[in-house]
Amino acid sequence: MRKIIVSLLLGSAMLSTAQETTINDALRYATNNLTGTARFRGMSGAFGAVGGDMSAINVNPAGSAFFNNNYASISGSSFNSKNNSNYFGNVTNDKFSTLDLNQIGAVLVFNDKSGKSDWSKIVVGLNYENTNDFDNRFFNAGVNPNNSIDRYFLDKAQGLPLEYVVTEQGESITELYTYLGQTSGLGFPAQQAMLAFQGYLIDTDAPESYFSNVETSGNYYQDNYVTTTGYNGKLSFNFATSYQNKLFLGINLNAHFTDYLKSSSVYESNNNRLNDTGFTATDIQFDNELYTYGTGFSLNLGAIYKFTESFRGGIAYESPTWYRLNDELAQRLIVVRTDGVSDFREVIAPNTTNLYDTYKIQTPSKWTVSAAYIFDKIGLLSIDYAMKDYSNTKFKPTSDDTYRNLNTDMDNLFQNAYELRIGGEYKIKQWSVRGGYRFEESPYKNDFAMGDLTGYSTGIGYNFGESKLDLAYANDHRNYNMALISSGMNDTARIRTTNNNVTLTYSINF
């Protein structure tokens, strides 16, 4: 009967129970990289009260009202990441580089030169930016003295009736895997238990009770290879205006797009003695490929006031981003076991993709206050201070027990974090030189899980008259922990990620 049901479902393999979502999945969308034009990046994004730059409108949408003419810019960047990992004292590193066209946008400026209205300018603009570049690669390896990754599979299996992990006569692994995800009501945990049981990684000694065929003597060599690709993109429609050339107001309506692919392979080996079952699992390889895609919406509001011709202050609000996301997951488990004489290799590959129900993530809102001092036509100094309460990050629907628990965890673990950006620019005839500093506090109350981010930047630009060419270099680093597997064992690798990015922007007045 089960085989008949599964045969009707194999075409779509749509699952009603989600895979193992973690709070790090929400952080992926709640945090943004510093991207944008070269001038913006050269000053570390300290543009909340400066304006006059296409990327500045993402901080404060009133900034577009400082354009005097129609204006357009396009930016390309080289993203270079280095990840140093320490796993039980063993240090490894990996590097990844990519090129990307990360910004393109334009504004149209409508000036009222009649003098009849105090609202002398209207600006409309359209700008696209990659707010996050997910292209990266990680590798960590070491000898774990205590825990095997079999803990993950045992955690999923305990309490599960044996009938759900054993194939019926003539039934394939694909059919059982699909049935567990779609029809059984047990979903993802049962799928993981079935993979391990079919691979002889775990076995049963009593109804609904399982044990591992990995020996418990410790000293497990483990490595984890992760490759991620994709982006978060934001398309902003901007409207701004000015009142008596002193008060500047603006609004952005933002459409968000995300495309994220994570391929991971966890490997473990050991040379421990045979256990009581007569054979031992000596090698484990667990492969996962997760694809996440979707769209979102947010808005920005902002104001800038010129207290004097030199001094400006700004305030801006960025709403939560409301994402609608979809996940697809493909898995494979390989186990090598021995009886002391011969080795047996089991490859459990369902050869099907899990398609999960659409879910939602709501990121936290953000407030930014800014100040800038303009030294006539010589240069400027600018400072931005922002606050974002990461504990307001939510998975939805909140009625789902899994999401409710994750939301509780985020409420307890995350904090209201601040961000500081300081930037300066100095002009020498047609040349401009820039520099900046930024600091982002960890989203976590305990920053051992994810540390603070510190970044520096510098840049240079040349003004041809009607057009400009700008170049920027930015460096930032952050420490955090990476788990080899999502549950069952708490051992993590300590990662230090360093980003070195170069951005080139061409802009033109038209």
Image: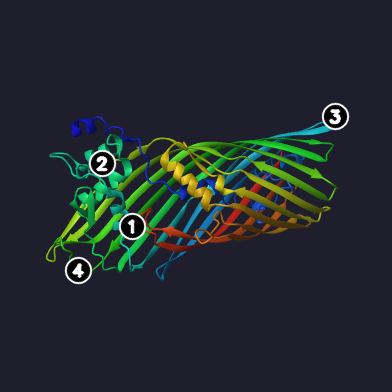
Relative to residue 218, is residue 88 drawn left or right?
right
Q: Is residue 133 visible?
A: no
CA gap, disc 3 to disc 2? 69 Å
Tell me which numbered mark, 1 or 3, is placed earlier along the sequence: 3
User: Who is closer to the viewer here, 330 or 113?
Assistant: 330
Q: Which residue type does callout 1 highlight? A: Val
- In front: label 1 or label 2: 2
| Snapshot quadrant of residue 116 | top right
The colouring scheme, among rainbow, by chain, secondary structure or one colour, is rainbow
Tell me which numbered mark, 3 or 2, is placed earlier along the sequence: 3
CA gap, disc 4 to disc 2? 32 Å
Tell me which numbered mark, 1 or 2, is placed earlier along the sequence: 2
Residue 473 % position (x, y): 61, 59
Residue 71 % position (x, y): 70, 40
Mark 1 nearby-residue class (10 Å; few <14, some 14–19, many ≥20) = many
Q: Dot 1: what SS? A: strand
Q: Dot 3: what SS? A: loop
x 17%, y 42%: residue: 167
CA gap, disc 1 to disc 3? 66 Å
Which disc number belongs to residue 266? 1
- In front: label 4 or label 1: 4
List the residue tagged with mark 3: 117
Q: Is residue 424 visible?
A: yes
Tell me which numbered mark, 4 or 1, is placed earlier along the sequence: 1
Relative to residue 319, is residue 371 drawn left or right?
right
List the residue tagged with mark 4: 273
Q: Which residue type does callout 4 highlight? A: Arg
